[in-house]
Image (cartoon, grey):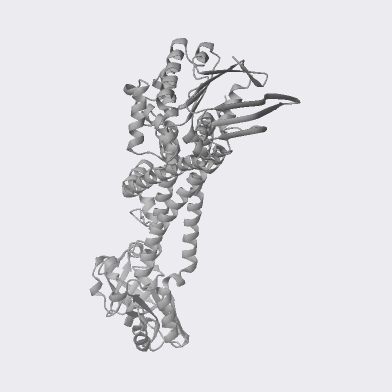
């Protein structure tokens, strides 16, 4: 196995709820290799989203070690280059059209030239939204919004996509189409995918399947 | 274009929406504040400038006065003429007389002017509304317009002039008959006080009326364009004997100018609050925007934005509102100034106060003048206040943690 893009060792995360201590993650170990796809399932409140927040560097573990391409720190700009994020609620900027939403990832890194515009156009075409490039999110369906969000996540050619229940707000047909697209694009772009989902069928399509329960991984 | 500026512009002017309500209201607040400042400060500046011109046109920029009588005016004129920045000077004598026409008395101020020199210092000819300035000689007088009306005197009327010298003569049992002068001109400067109580005679006539001999009371001095009246006054004082004192027109009217400036400053200060109130509205709207866009702010952080960049995005929104509001405020303000006389005419027609305006404000046309300094002050104030309005929302946005912002409902 090649050097992992992401290596998590002994991750612990604790939340305090009044007097109660809720230990969500208890020594989670995880390594993501380049190009592999991993699904994580688990019941609600099992810590899937918490784990994804740690893996994306948005949150810090209480203990344990996290390394992104061997580095223990992940500055915001580096996160933008290394990791693409897909959320359940899409989080598109309502004032921007689909094309500008895709370009936003590049803009945040200060890259906004002709190659980036061409890439945004190509990604929109790839997700089947060429005709909707100038439409704002309000004029797009849920499935179309999620496809724009996937294109945005891939814009900076990240090495890893972290997708947090990307089909959670979609109907079954749209959800299946989004998963098809996500897996196909990750394979085309050669980037790894960590897919958090409740859907067993979607999880089954990933090469490695994990189940998060009682703060640790179990084989699905 | 940096992305914070790009996103600020997009949030204020979203794609597909031509007139976003929040942006329009925010800009309108600043616009009104700036426009009102422009109009009020321009009109105040216009009044100040009219008054300045009136003072300079009737006194010159510098006035040299003797502590008693100026017995050798020619020597003073010669000395003053050597000072750098002086282009002309003219002696004058002044006082108060009793004027009578057909049993109607008046007690105006009288000004004796040197016919050969006065025109090079004060443009009296410009203010003559009837008769001719050139007709003025030792047997004639020019009356101010309202005084002429008050006395019922016209061109060619004879007026009797009683000077204080008559009383002096009475003390020694001499009787001096009043001087009969023919009205050869009527002037109107546009200032009620001057237009109602001043008469102009030749310097010789004044010297005779007051028994001055060859003496005068002072010398009016005209300066070259750009010469500083205070500097020239100081130079004249250094060159003159100690019993004479030169004062610039600003120095002579220090209290009056101070009051004018104070009024202008107060108006500026009070009207600035309109912009401050508008800025509070901008702050409030941007704070609501921060709350409404919490998850988007979280998204920006997740995609690689730093807190400073997120803060800049909201700061830019305050600045853009300030710039747009200031520009439209300038356009509105200068438009109002351009059409001010039509607006005032319409307003006075509605309220029936046309005559009162001319009578009490002494100007038939509303004056307006905005100095570059005042304009810069208004623009900078509006921009600074609007920029400050964006700081609190910017700070609130910057301290949001992406992971918490994304979780927010």
Residue closest to the far right: A19
Which of B160/A81 is in front? A81
Which of B344/B339 is in front? B339
Q: Is residue B10 above or below residue B47?
A: above
Which of B205/B326 is in front? B326
Residue closest to the far front: A1
Q: How many marks?
A: 0
Residue A46's spot in the image, x, y percent? Answer: 64, 19
Residue A47's spot in the image, x, y percent? Answer: 63, 22
Which of A82/B398 is in front? A82
Residue A4's spot in the image, x, y percent? Answer: 53, 31
Q: Quadrant of residue B135?
A: bottom left
Q: Is residue A182 above or below residue B306?
A: above
Residue A71's spot in the image, x, y percent? Answer: 56, 38
Q: Is residue A77 left or right of residue A25?
A: left
Q: Can you see residue B193?
A: yes
Q: Quadrant of residue B186?
A: bottom left
Q: Residue at x 45, y 48 (%)?
A: B383
Q: Is residue B233 above or below residue A137?
A: below
For the C terminus of chain A, give its image quadrant: top right
Q: Can you see residue A93?
A: no
Q: Quadrant of residue A180?
A: top left
């Amino acid at each position: 196995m090649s050097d992992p893009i992401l290596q998590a060792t002994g991750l612990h995360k604790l939340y305090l709820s009044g007097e109660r201590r809720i230990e969500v993650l208890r020594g989670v170990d995880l390594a993501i290799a380049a190009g592999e796809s991993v699904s994580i399932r688990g019941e609600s409140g099992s810590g899937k989203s918490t784990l994804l927040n740690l893996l994306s560097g948005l949150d810090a573990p209480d203990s344990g070690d996290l390394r992104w391409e061997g580095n223990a720190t992940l500055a915001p700009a580096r996160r933008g280059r290394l990791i693409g994020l897909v959320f359940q609620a899409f989080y598109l900027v309502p004032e921007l059209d689909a094309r500008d939403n895709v370009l936003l990832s590049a803009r945040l890194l200060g890259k906004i030239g002709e190659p980036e515009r061409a890439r945004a156009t190509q990604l929109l075409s790839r997700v089947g939204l060429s005709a909707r490039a100038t439409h704002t999110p309000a004029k797009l369906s849920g499935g179309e919004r999620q496809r724009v969000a996937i294109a945005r996540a891939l814009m900076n050619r990240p090495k890893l996509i972290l997708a947090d229940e990307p089909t959670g707000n979609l109907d079954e047909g749209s959800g299946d189409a989004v998963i098809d697209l996500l897996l196909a694009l990750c394979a085309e772009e050669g980037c790894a995918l960590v897919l958090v989902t409740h859907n067993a069928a979607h999880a089954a399509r990933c090469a490695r399947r994990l189940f998060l329960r009682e703060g640790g991984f179990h084989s699905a | 274009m940096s992305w914070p500026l790009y996103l600020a512009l997009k949030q204020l002017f979203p794609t597909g929406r031509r007139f976003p309500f929040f942006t329009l209201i925010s800009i309108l607040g600043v616009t009104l504040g700036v426009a009102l400042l422009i109009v009020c400060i321009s009109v105040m500046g216009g009044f100040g400038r009219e008054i300045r011109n009136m003072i300079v046109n009737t006194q010159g920029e510098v006035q040299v006065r003797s502590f008693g009588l100026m017995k050798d005016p020619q020597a003073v004129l010669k000395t003053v003429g050597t000072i750098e920045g002086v282009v002309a000077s003219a002696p004058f004598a002044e006082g108060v007389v009793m004027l009578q026409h057909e049993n109607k008395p008046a007690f105006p101020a009288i000004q004796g002017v040197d016919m050969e020199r006065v025109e090079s210092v004060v443009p009296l000819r410009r203010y003559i509304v009837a008769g001719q300035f050139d007709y003025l000689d030792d047997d004639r007088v020019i009356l101010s317009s309202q005084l002429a009306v008050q006395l019922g005197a016209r061109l060619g009327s004879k007026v009797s002039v009683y000077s204080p010298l008559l009383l002096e003569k009475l003390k020694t049992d001499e009787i001096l008959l009043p001087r009969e002068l023919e009205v050869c001109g009527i002037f109107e400067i546009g200032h009620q006080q001057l237009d109602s109580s001043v008469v102009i005679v030749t310097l010789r006539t004044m010297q005779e009326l007051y028994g001055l001999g060859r003496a005068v009371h002072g010398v009016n001095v005209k300066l070259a364009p750009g010469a500083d009246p205070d500097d020239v006054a100081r130079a004249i004082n250094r060159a003159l004997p100690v019993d004479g004192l030169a004062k610039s027109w600003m120095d002579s009217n220090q209290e009056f100018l101070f009051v004018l400036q104070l009024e202008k400053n107060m108006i500026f200060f009070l009207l600035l609050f309109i912009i401050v109130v508008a800025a509070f509205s901008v702050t409030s709207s941007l704070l609501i925007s921060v709350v409404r866009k919490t998850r988007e702010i979280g998204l920006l952080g997740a995609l690689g934005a730093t807190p400073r960049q997120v803060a800049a995005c909201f700061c830019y929104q305050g600045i853009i509102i300030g710039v747009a509001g200031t520009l439209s405020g300038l356009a509105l303000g200068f438009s109002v100034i351009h059409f001010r006389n039509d607006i005032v005419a319409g307003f006075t027609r509605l309220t029936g106060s046309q005559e009162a305006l001319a009578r009490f404000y002494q100007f038939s046309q509303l004056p307006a003048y905005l100095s570059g300094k005042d304009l810069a002050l208004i623009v900078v104030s509006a921009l600074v206040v609007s920029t400050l309005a964006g700081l609190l929302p910017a700070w609130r946005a910057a301290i949001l943690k992406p992971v918490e912002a994304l979780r927010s409902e």
